[in-house]
Amino acid sequence: MIIHVILEGIGLGLLLILVCKIGISGGAVKMVHLYSQEVQERCIQLGLTSPKCIKHNSLLFKIICVPGYIAYILICTYGLNGARGFWEGFWQMLLILSIMNLIDRFLVDDFWVGHTKDWTIRGTEDLKPYITARDKKKKWAVGTIGMAMIAAILSIIMTFIIH
């Protein structure tokens, strides 16, 4: 069972990478809402985007990703794996989300954004690294605590629905 859940976590991480790949397909500026405020402001100054466009892309990203990720982990945990109680659902969802978080931190943030040109926005190169040490600490903390909270909340909801 644990191997199965680990593979589901890798699957969610790959889904995240696919969403990012699609998001930057026409240029990384489409995903500038994921960058610091300083990079966003520079992109606006350069005429590459507008505040309205940044808000729109951010909202679109959240509307697609959050429900999609939640559906994925619920289907895996309760549909495919047959979890029925709080703890059974919690540990599976936490593991799936934690694996996605590791993929996001190491493969997306550290490698893809930090060491390739795919996420470079022309005219903002002097603002690199786009993900600073401070940003990384915040992402680790929020990601780790956030994944546990999401898993707990969803497990509570599903426990009430199932029982």
Image (cartoon, rainbow, N blue to C red):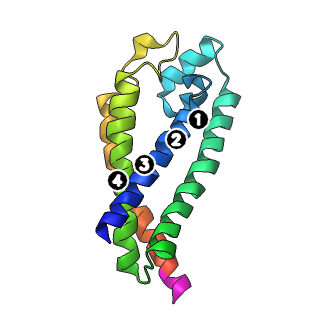
Q: CA distance from mark 2 to mark 3?
A: 9 Å
> Could you tell me the amino acid type at mark 2?
Leu
Q: Quadrant of the N terminus?
A: bottom left
Do the numbered discs 1 and 2 sit on residues whose CB atoms are within 8 Å? yes
Do the numbered discs 4 and 3 sit on residues whose CB atoms are within 8 Å? yes
> Could you tell me the amino acid type at mark 4?
Ile
Do the numbered discs 4 and 1 sit on residues whose CB atoms are within 8 Å? no
**Mark drawn on residue 99:** 4
The residue that disc 2 covers is 18
Q: Position of residue 59 (x, y in %)?
A: 64, 43
* Above/below status of 125 relative to 91: above
> Could you tell me the amino acid type at mark 3?
Gly
Label 2 crowding class (10 Å Cα cut-off): few <14, some 14-19, many 20+? Answer: few
Residue placed farthest to the bottom in the image? 163
The residue that disc 3 covers is 13
Q: Secondary structure at mark 2?
A: helix
